Image (cartoon, coloured by chain):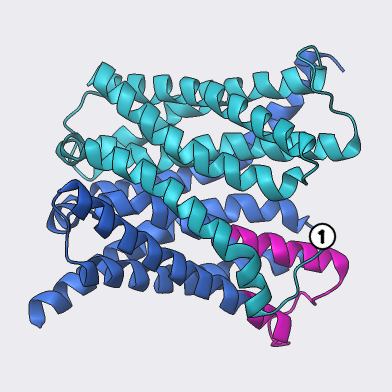
Amino acid sequence: MPTEWTVRAITRAMLPILLLLTLVELGSGLVLGSFESELLRYPTLLALVPVTIGTAGNLGSILAARLSTAFHLGTLSFDPTDEELAGNALATVALSVTVFPVVGVGAWGLTSLVGQTRLPVRTVLSVSLASGVVLAVLAVAVTLAATYAAYRFELDPDDVVIPLVTNSCDVLGVLVLFASVQVFV
Amino acid sequence: MSIRDAAVEAYREALPALVASLVGGLVAGVVLGGMRAELRAVPGLLVLVPALLATRGNVYGSLGARIATALHQGLIEPRVTAGDRRLRAAAAAALGNGLLASTFAATAVFLILSVLGSRVAPLPVLVGIAVLAGLLSGVVLVVVVVTVVFAGYRRGRNPDTLVGPIVTTTGDVFGVVFLLVAVRTVLFLGGAV
């Protein structure tokens, strides 16, 4: 049933889930806070934060939107040999391998234009590419699990899956970024 | 369709939107990287950043999706001058919910960091920054989302595919820029009082 267009009706439909998602995001904020000193020492790493979590969320939400459309059209089956499913998952990983080197070099280049880089470009590239590939695999897993759960509980994947996927990719994005900073920096 | 065909099609369709929002994310990141003095001056602000940025995406993404669906159903006209009552209600609800979520996030960060015994800025400072940043970026995002979705629809584009990339790109950039403006304003007022 569509929500009525009044402030009260929209708020009632939106606010509970919004506050819940805010709590989830505070989780990723706390992880950021735990390596605050590294982030403040290296501005390039700080510059990686919004673009890494944003791109991870976008990869997940594009996949979710495509799967949910395929699901509504009835062309999707939850079978590992399903071409549509496997092809979309493969494309997600390929997209991350294309985009994350640009993320790393872009963050390094723009930060050095402002004149503040302290890390070599190789290190920033390693951090972003490693984070990106791990995140793509995680985004595929989360999206498949959420779409499958929506299907089992007979919920519309359009309503449920995208907010769930973008917000959990935010948290995973910060966690993975934290892990690869520990490995490479 | 083979796996390869499905993958190539998905890759081609997703790449432009992904690259557009990547540019927005990089700009936001560089502004954030230049904000280190403010992040040091307001302990707890960094913890608040993901929640504030995500609120923009969640609230104004939902506003955009709602307007796109209403356009498809013919519920609203793609003109701002009409001063449509429904459109005003949807925009006011988005702004109000965004501010409530920002206040909630700032209060929660203050409480959690206090309980953990971490250094944290006073509650009014965090709430003031969150509300001011939410208000400024909210007003701009309402205007951007409504204008772009209407303009795209009038030119025969599917508003559903416009909303996602627009909100993530402008949300990140304006979110961080207005966060910087809000921090400086609150710190200035705090110093002046």
Looking at the rendering, which quadrant does residue B10 occupy? top right
In the depicted view, which residue is nearer to us: A42 or A181?
A181
Let me know if residue B103 is in the magenta part.
no
For the residue marked with disc 1, what is the amino acid?
Gly
Which colour denotes chain A? cyan
Dominant secondary-structure state across the stretch colored magenta: helix
- Of residue B52 and residue A132, the one placed in the foreground of this image is B52
Any part of residue A128 in sight: yes
Residue A103 against residue A141 in the figure, above or below: below
A148 is higher (above) or lower (below) than B153: above
Task: State left or right for residue B11 relative to residue A75.
Answer: left
**Rendering coords of residue B62 (x, y %):** 63, 60
Task: Name the residue at 38% across, 43% down.
Answer: A27
Question: Can the viewer see residue B147 in this picture?
Answer: no
Along the viewing direction, whichever of B7 and A79 lies nearer the viewer: A79
Provide the residue span drawn in magenta.
Answer: B61-90
Dot 1: what SS? loop
Residue, far right: A74
Residue A67 percent coordinates (x, y):
75, 34
Residue B25 pos. (x, y %): 43, 45
Chain that is blue in the image: B
- Read off the residue under disc 1: B156
